[in-house]
Amino acid sequence: MCGIIGYAGHRPAVPVVMEGLERLEYRGYDSAGVAWPAACGIGVARARGKLSALAEKLAAMPPVLATCAMGHTRWATHGEPAERNAHPHLCPDRSVAIVHNGIIENYQELRQDLLARGYAFQSETDTEVLVNLIAERRKTEPDILRALAVALREARGAYAICLLCEEEPGVLYAARQQAPLICGIGVGENFVASDIPAFLPWTRKVVFLEDGEIIRINATSREIFRISDLSPVGREPASIQWDMQAARKDGYRHFMLKEIFEQPRVINDGLAGRLNAAHDLPALPELDALPIPSRLDIVACGTSWHAGLWGRHLLENWAQIPVSVDIASEFRYRERLLLEKDGAAIFISQSGETADTLAALRRGHDAGIPTLGLCNVVGSSIAREARSVIFTQAGPEISVASTKAMTSQMLALALMAISWALRKGCMEQREAREQIAILRDLPSLLDDILPEMRVRAQELAVKYATCKNFFYLGRGFSWPLALEGALKLKELSYIHAEGYAAGEMKHGPIALIDPAFPTFAIAPDDALFAKLKSNIMEVRARNGKVIALTNPGVELDADDLWIVPKIPAPLSALAALPALQLFSYQMADYLGKDVDQPRNLAKSVTVE
Ligand code: M6R
């Protein structure tokens, strides 16, 4: 995830763009850059690291007086965080520059073709491929708008781009496909950006671009075209009512709520570039670097550990690889034999900086086993030190309570399990395709059900807000969800909650049940439903109140049924998880807790 902004107006443009980038920095901060029309050609400044590094570089240069410019703040996906990979990228004769947010999925094919035509690349990015493709298409189609449209029709994937061409110094072109892009309309000035806060101090009048559209702006006008045939599009501007603080959260009350609602996009982004050309089977080149392990250790902390527990079921059931899942702080001190022939270990961490997970990874190295990092933050310690890395691509997660990161980890684990299962021949392609189809359908299903889910979460939170304790119960694939539901409730609302494997209740914990100690049962209509139903009856027989998260059509006796659409297990967990997150969110908000920064916690636990 990256942030882009473009400005065409009457003021010095680079300071405007830099201010906009500051408000987009939450989208990534591995490197940043700006480009502007200069006396001869296109001027560019880029720097690795946070925006402050770019600001220092610009401060050391003569002031830039151009009234048109564009900028980028990067969350690295293709290519390490380095200045050569920072945007803007230029074509070889430096006549065209672009900034880009997203992933061009077929960039390798396009790159090969351009290499064969004599293009040399300065970076490892898919963005440089795109700008070179535009340059190549200009050879037969000199008009920049037409050349851009032709190139974009060849590019597959998700993108929001902004383009500056030497021959049209006061003009910017921008386009979108499955990545946000908004035009801000000022007086004698126009903007394009990934997010409204980038230009909110200057205008509240906006036009939202749709997928498959190009916009051309200068200081006084804007025109929208369809990429497919360059036919013009008319669209009325809208007016934004948010203040700056709320706008940084996209109008959501808290970052956590925004991040919960981002999960459909996270699934889309996690699939982009991870599927074959037909989009029906996984394509994970990162895994090909490793032999298929005969057994696996999964090591992580907190929510990432819960994702690992869920992933174990898929790796065992689908890929038939025996898996142990450990908490990193335990794993690093356990005397156990890691040196198993053909084994491997997966280290899951959103931040990539969790001290225990990092120490466990180093222990894996010492033992000589292949290590695989599953990380969200590019350039983090675990990402750098693991032998192989799969980036979960959830984008920056700001709320301390992890939500969308878990979804992205589960998605990556599912793709890994399918990949290995296919390579081992223990899953048929037909079944793999069915699972991928479920994953591909999930984003639109979640988009549809999340608002209603939030309303139900709110009702239940109000009803149960006086409780001091909670059980969360689940079986099989749903046990890790029970653990995660309990963790979310305690870390956000400070209500004591225990996550249990439902079958363990009668081995002691059921003694705690009374009318004031409710149970949240995760009861999907799957192979273990009948067993879980019996556990719910045992709780109710002891006057325990039960909220049951389940699917339509089941017969279940509970105080409160929470029905979510049925999706085949185990991927059903990706639709149940947001309900647990929303329940905790609504509870904490209702109780007046600090949702985004709960007491005593930090986003990244870098000490033991
Ligand atoms: O960055 P990591 O995934 O390694 O972090 C692990 C845990 O610290 C993290 O998941 C923590 O449990 C969250 N606060 C849970 O919401």
Image (cartoon, rainbow, N blue to C red):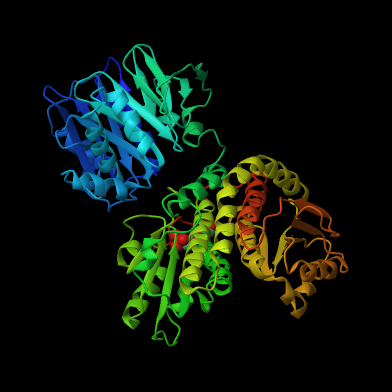
Looking at the image, which residue is at 77% across and 58% down? Answer: 548
Give the side of residue 468 with respect to residue 287, left or right: right
Give the side of residue 383 with respect to residue 278, left or right: left
Residue 563 visible, this orientation: yes
For the residue pair 415 and 600, the one nearer the viewer reads as 415
Total marks placed: 0
For the residue pair 356 and 100, the one nearer the viewer reads as 100
Question: Residue 503: x percent and y percent?
Answer: 73, 75
For the residue pair 215 and 479, the one nearer the viewer reads as 215
Quarter-of-image position of residue 33: top left
Residue 194 visible, this orientation: no
Question: Residue 605: x percent and y percent?
Answer: 43, 62
Quarter-of-image position of residue 225: top left
Relative height, residue 175 to residue 371 (above, below): above
Question: Residue 135: x percent and y percent?
Answer: 22, 33
Which quarter shows the C terminus? bottom left
Question: Residue 391: x percent and y percent?
Answer: 40, 57
Quarter-of-image position of residue 544: bottom right
Looking at the image, which residue is at 52% across and 72% down? Answer: 319
Give the side of residue 581 with respect to residue 353, left or right: right
Relative height, residue 491 to residue 171 (above, below): below
For the residue pair 301 and 178, the one nearer the viewer reads as 178
Which quarter shows the N terminus? top left
Relative height, residue 218 to residue 114 (above, below): above
